[in-house]
Image (tube, grey):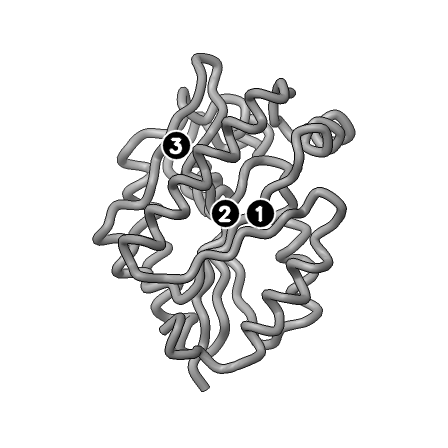
Amino acid sequence: MAFHVVYLTGPPASGKTTLCGRLKDKVNPLAIYHYSALLLDHVRSSHSEFINLSEDDLRKRSAALITSEDVAAVDKRLIEMVQHSRTEAHVIIDSHAVTKESYGYRITPFAIPLLQALQPTLIVMLYAEAHEIDRRISRSSGGRPLVSKFEADFHIALQAQVAVSYGLQLGLPIYVYDSTDSVDQASENLASKLNGRVSRESA
C-alpha cells in the first residue's frame, strides 16, 4: 500500500480543520499535522515567557512572536514526523503560508528543499466566498481578524499563488475545493483519493 501525503492549505475560516475532522471518519489510517499547533507547542516549550500562549494569541500576533529560528525548528520536526508516518498512514499537512498582519499580509512559504523532503503527493486548497468567510469569523473568530471582501478575496488569491507554485515546483496536481456551502463534497472527493492507491499522476 502506498500512502498519500497531502499538503492542505487555504485562508482562515475556509474549513481546513472541519475537513480534517470529516476525513478522520472516512480514511484509515490517517495522520494529521496542523502546522500552527506544532508551532505553538514549539514556542511554548522553547520560550518560557510564552508558556501560556494560546492559539488565538498566535493568530493575532504571529509576526511579532515567531522568529525564523522557530519556523526552521518546526520545519525540521515536521519533516521527521512526516517521513516516519508516511510509511504506515496517509498524512495531511495543514498549513498556510499567508497570514493577515496589521500592516497587510505576510507570506512564509516552504523552501524548495523542504518541499522536496516532505514529498507531498497531492496539493489541496480550500476557499470560500467572502460573505461566508465573514460570517464564520464573526461567529467564532479564534483570534482571526475580520476582513473586508477585498481582503478576503486577496488572501485567497495570494494563497492560491503559493499552492500553484508548489505544484509547479513538484509537478503535482492541485485540487481547489469551494467550501462556501460546506466541506462535504471536498471531504468525499479527497477521501476517495486517499482510500485508493497513489496513482502515476500524483506519485
Give residue 176's position: percent from left, percent from top.
54, 51
Q: Is residue 80 visible?
A: no
Q: Is residue 183 visible?
A: yes
Instruction: Please tell me whether residue 82 is drawn above or below residue 40 in the rendered image.
Output: below
Give residue 36's position: percent from left, percent from top.
49, 42
Instruction: Please tell me whether residue 1 is drawn above or below residue 150 in the rendered image.
Output: below
Q: Residue at x 39, y 73 (%)?
A: 201
Instruction: Please tell me whether residue 69 is drawn above or below residue 202 in the rendered image.
Output: above
The crowd level at tag 3 (other Cα within 10 Å; few <14, some 14-19, many 20+) is few
Q: Residue at x 62, y 69 (%)?
A: 191
The amino acid type found where label 3 is placed reads His
The crowd level at tag 1 (other Cα within 10 Å; few <14, some 14-19, many 20+) is many
Q: Nearer the viewer, residue 25 or 122?
A: 122
Q: Nearer the viewer, residue 16 or 142?
A: 16
Q: Which mark is residue 47?
A: 3
Badge 3 element: loop
Q: Label 1, on which residue?
A: 126
Q: Label 2, on which residue?
A: 9
The N terminus lies in quadrant: bottom left
Q: Nearer the viewer, mark 1 or mark 2?
A: 1
Q: Nearer the viewer, residue 149 or 27?
A: 149
Badge 2 element: strand
The residue at the far left in this view is 113
Badge 1 element: strand
The C terminus lies in quadrant: bottom left
User: Mark 2 or mark 3, which has the lower sequence index?
Assistant: 2
